[in-house]
Amino acid sequence: VAYRSGVLLMWAAFGVPVLLAAIYDGYMRREISKTNFSSQSPMLHKSGIDVFRAAIALMVAWLLIPWHTSMLVAPTGFFIIGAAAWLWISNAPKRM
């Protein structure tokens, strides 16, 4: 657990800016879509939430399960979490 936590922290220097950029871009995309005559997809919103939750759960499982896996699980997880957050936020309903 300690080794994988260290790997996760090492990749966090790359992953956190990527996550923040994806979240901000998704929010701006949502704001632009609110002023246009385009509608957000509830199916994409729901799938973004589901993929986000699954990716977080798999990252926690990767930290705790003692199987030999590649170190590239951490950056892949950050990328999947960022993409799912972008999909989730950009397709949020216009009124909440």
Image (cartoon, rainbow, N blue to C red):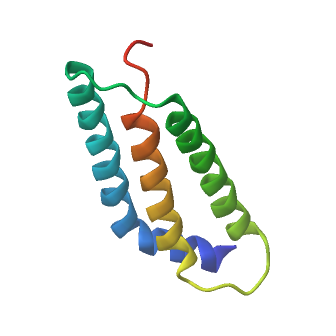
Residue drawn where x is 20% and y is 20% of the image: 35
Indicate the quadrant containing the C terminus: top left, top right, bottom left or bottom right.
top left
Q: Residue 28 occupies which quadrant of the picture?
A: top left
- Of 30 and 18, nearer the camera is 30
> Where residue 31 sits in the image (x, y, percent)?
24, 27
Residue at far top of view: 95
Q: Residue 70 occupies which quadrant of the picture?
A: bottom right
Total numbered badges shown on the rendered structure: 0
Determine whether, in the image, residue 10 is placed left or right of residue 77.
left
- Of 75 and 26, nearer the camera is 26
Residue drawn where x is 73% and y is 63% of the image: 61
Image height of 55 relative to 5, above or below: above
> Where residue 57 sits in the image (x, y, percent)?
68, 54
Q: Residue 62 occupies which quadrant of the picture?
A: bottom right
Residue drawn where x is 29% and y is 26% of the image: 38
> Where residue 25 sits in the image (x, y, percent)?
26, 44
Residue at far front of view: 37
Image height of 7 relative to 93, above or below: below
Residue at far right of view: 66
